[in-house]
Every structure is written in C-alpha cells, then in structure tokens.
Amino acid sequence: MTTFKVVTQSTSPYIDQKPGTSGLRKKVTVFQQPNYLHNFVQATFNALSIEKVKGSTIVISGDGRYFSKDAVQIIIKLSAANGVRRVWIGQDGLLSTPAVSAVIRNRVGSDGEKAFGAFILTASHNPGGPHEDFGIKYNSENGGPALEGLTNKMYDLTKTIKEYLIAEDLPNVDISSIGTTSFQGPEGAFEVEVFDATEDYVNLLKTLWLDSTGLKIAHLLSYVGTIFDFKAIKNLLARPDFSFCYDALHGVAGVYAKKIFIDELSADESSLLNCVPKEDFGGGHPDPNLTYAKELVARMGLSKAAPVSEPPEFGAAADGDADRNMILGKRFFVTPSDSVAIIAANAIGSIPYFNSGLKGVARSMPTSAALDVVAKNLNLKFFEVPTGWKFFGNLMDAGLCSVCGEESFGTGSDHIREKDGIWAVLAWLSILAHRNKNVSTDSKLVTVEDVVRQHWATYGRHFYTRYDYENVDADAAKELMAHLVNVQSSLPEVNKLIKQVRPDVADVEKADEFEYKDPVDGSISSHQGIRYLFQDGSRLVFRLSGTGSEGATIRLYIEQYQSDSTKIGTEAQDALAPLVKVALSLSKMQEFTGRSSPTVIT
C-alpha cells in the first residue's frame, strides 16, 4: 500500500475569494494562480468542525470543464492531509450537480459510511476552456449548497489564511476507471473510490424509499413508490405521433441522458444532441436558453434563419452541470416561470412522488408570479425567496416545500436539495404522458403548447422577459442600482415619469429593495433586488447577478399579468413593449452602461 506524508505549506491570502450565490467562480487563469484553489479548499476545511472532517467521507466531482481534472487531484491531496478518510468521485470526475446532491443524501458505502459534504467543480452555465470560467462550491450534508453562515466564515478565513495542509507525495489517482485506490497516511488509511456517475441518481428517480423519520432516502426500510412512472413515459416516447429531442450542450447531462432516455426509456439515439461531455463544451456556451441552445432551437422550429418542416413534439436542453433546463414544444417556448407553475398545477396525478399532495411551493423573487396564482387556487403554502437554491433547501428541510423554481431555468423538488434539469424534463414528460393516457394514436396528441394554453386559460398569463446586460463595468452597475433606489423615494415622481413615457402603463403602487426573513431559521437577507410593483399586478425587477466570473451582470425582469382570456394570445413582445420602454427609461440603462441593447433576451 502506498504511503504519504502530510506537509504544511506557507501561503498568502487572496482578497477575491468571496463565494457568490453558487460558489466561487473565476477565470481558469485565476484558479491557476499559485495556491489559489488550495487556499479556498483549506479555508473550507477550516470553517468546518474538526469532528466533521476527521475520518469523514466527501464527494469531489463536477461538470468536467477545463481544469477539473487538475482540481480533482489537488483536492484529493488536500483532503488526505486534513484527515478525510474517504473520497468519492464520479467516473472521469463527472457528476451533475443534482447527482452530487443525490449521492450525499442517498449513497451508502461498503462500511455503512455516508458523505458529509462535497466539493462541486462547476461554473454551471458559464463557458469552459483555458481562458473561460471555472468554479467550485461546497455542498453540506443535506445535499444542498452551503448556507451563508458557512460561506461567510469560509470567506473570512480566505482573507487571513497563512498555511494549508497537503499530501504532496500522494500519487495522482486514476479517475477514469471504477474502483478503489487505498493509501496509508500518518493518521491511518485513506481511500479514493471511483464509481458510476449515473447509478445513485438514476436509482433515485426510479425508486423511492421512506425511513423511520419520514425522510425520503433511497437506502432504508420500506418501499413506498416511485418518483416517476418510467413505464408511462416510455409508452409516451413509443407513440408514433410523439417525437423527442434533448440537447446536453456538451455538458455533464449527456452522461445521464444516455442512461435515462436511451437505456431506461428506449428513446432513439438520434433524439440526443451534443451529449458527449467536453472540457470546453464544444466551444459553445452551455446555457439552455433561446440564444445559446441554437441547434435545439433550430430543430424545434423556433429559428427564423433555419426553418424546418416538421419539428419534434418535445425538446429540452441542459446547462453545463445539468441543474438547469429549457422546455420547448413544437415551435413553442415555455418560459421557466410558466414551467414551474404548470408542474405544480399538474403534479398530483401526473407524478407519483406527489400523489399524497404538495407540502407547499416556492419561487425566487425575480420569477414571475404564475406560481403564486396556482398556489392561491390550490390552497398551497407559498414562499417568495431570494435568488439561490439554498433558500429553497431550508424550506424543504422543514417540510414546507415540495416544488420550486427560478426564472433562470432552474426547477426542482424536495427529492434532492439542488435544482434538477433532468427531473424537470421527466416531470414534463410525465404530464404529457398523463394527459395522453387515454388519447388514442388516431386522435390529436395533447402537446406542450396545448398544456400551456390550457394553463393560461385557467390561471391567466404572465407575460415575462429578462434582459441580461453582461460584463458591465462594475462601478457603472452599482451607480445604476443606486439611482433606482434613489428614485423610489418619491412614487408620485416615478408615476409622473412613467406617464411621460407610456401613459397606458398602470401606476406603481409599491417600490422597494426585496428583503427576506427565512421562516425556518429567522435569518435576514437584504438588498436582494429592486422592485417596482404596479397596480395591475405587473412588475419590474432590477438585480445584479452573482453567477458571473468578471465584471457585473445587470438583470432586468419585466412582467405583465393578463387575466382576460381574449388577450392571453397576444404576442409576448407586443404585450411587454410598454413596460420595456418604461424600464429602460426609468433606469437610464443606456446612460449608465453605454449599452443600447442587452447581451441576452430570454
């Protein structure tokens, strides 16, 4: 058995290692600076209690982007030196972010051990490559992102760190082959286990168990049902009038797509696009939206530049780490805000996991209020939280939330503690399977568009768009936000300005900076976005995003509610045009940023 020594190395702190809403994200070249990654990982270990780290099991994996393989080996050596007993790694260092959550919550080792946390190597929907983005985030024992109390402690420690522990002579571990590699260190045995990246996650989606505490986990006591009815979905995919397309954008979702859609559900391999994970995502931008998922958008008949005669009935895409999703019908786009509302409205009856009912639903503040209307009509508990999945996790751990979502293409449930792109796709396929259960192949298929339009007819329509201004000068972005806060001091002046721009827009009845008091732990999250709430239910929201790697991203959210059934078929661009004009004028967007148009419109 190979032995190793623990070495204490001196280091100097970096001042820019504050985790954002989804961990620490920087350019690869930043992470390649001497000890940059070492400092952050050591600070994380220091922030955790010694009892948690010593003799523990942790997970290290990610979306496979450039620098991941180097990072895995560095973190293995740091883990060994800090007294970790076992490291679990998905084959080739690949695990989707939802799969990591499933592994933490459900996987049990040969000696009965469970993981206490994970280092996830991803920058999510950001590009990858030698000059692009890398990221790392820590997930806790509930499978969800570390809460602010821990990330703040980690950040404080990065500012004063003077040394780190490392097993420098530990040889690199082969992460391409399944198996266990054993070592001997000063404090005893140390093991690195490489396992099938799809096993735990796919088993979770197929099988649900209940333990004695009522927690849904996949390894204890009595069987009670399945999350999804794979047979029903398989029957849907086998219909001659149903066609399907899934684009992984060369992210880690490709590994799971092949296992689930091809091996389990018998879809044709031609239905998969870009399902080979690549370090640079094939040179593309792994963000599942109408701008970056160009090949899927074209195939689904939504590209004016490349029209097709007969698009598939259903299309979906994932981001780099497979926690986000985009849902498309034939020549039809489903907004993420509508998607989570429709899943919640159709969950009972369509998805076995929810047959006993929903505990509650939640959305991020910038997400449209479509879910609010569903919750009110179905008498469900409802929560509006800041952006960041950790806020949903707190509600789920307290048994208050079953389904939740974000406008940024994130949807999920309490089966894990991360948003889950493939879960959302299977949820939609389950709804379609249920709606078409008694529809013969000689009759008209109930389509994605049918489901959405029926939803609008029942609950009203929330016309919605998001403008992203990426890599804006950080100081200019802050000045714009300060301007918007200052304008809020006088609503009469705000409404006077609005009438000068568009007399047909309703008055603002409330304007504020969103603040959230967590109903579970009482913590306060302030300055979470600037809101203008109109008398007719419309909204304007301005927010600085925390998921970029450089500069600032200003996100402008525009929402117009329409309950009149004769007007819900209006083109979204036309319905939103008055509010768009008001938002750009009110914020002085071009004056502050120098941008005449957004980088991305969703």
Image (cartoon, rainbow, N blue to C red):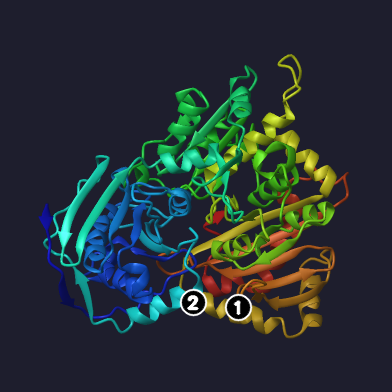
Q: Which residue is depicted at the point 74% across and 76% down?
A: 511
159 sits left or right of 321 in the view: left
Say what amino acid the circle numbered 1 marks. Answer: Ser
Query: SS of the residue at dot 1?
Result: loop
Q: Earlier in the sequence, mark 1 or mark 2?
A: 2
Q: Badge 1 local density, few (<14 within 10 Å), some, or many (20+)?
A: few
Give the residue displayed 14% in from the left and 64% down from the top: 168
For disc 2, the marked residue is: 149
Left or right: 47 as drawn, with respect to 487? left
According to the image, label 1 marks what residue? 523
Determine whether 467 is above or below 526 in the image: above
The x and y percentages for residue 548 are: 45, 64
What SS does tag 2 mark?
helix
Report x, y in % for residue 90.
34, 46
Quadrant hosting residue 399: bottom right
Q: Which mark is residue 511?
A: none
Q: Is residue 447 left or right of residue 142?
A: right
Q: Is residue 326 visible?
A: no
Q: Which residue is depicted at the point 67% across and 52% down?
A: 337
Q: Are the residues tagged 1 and 2 within 8 Å (C-beta)?
A: yes
Give the residue furthest to the top: 442
Give the quadrant of residue 85: bottom left
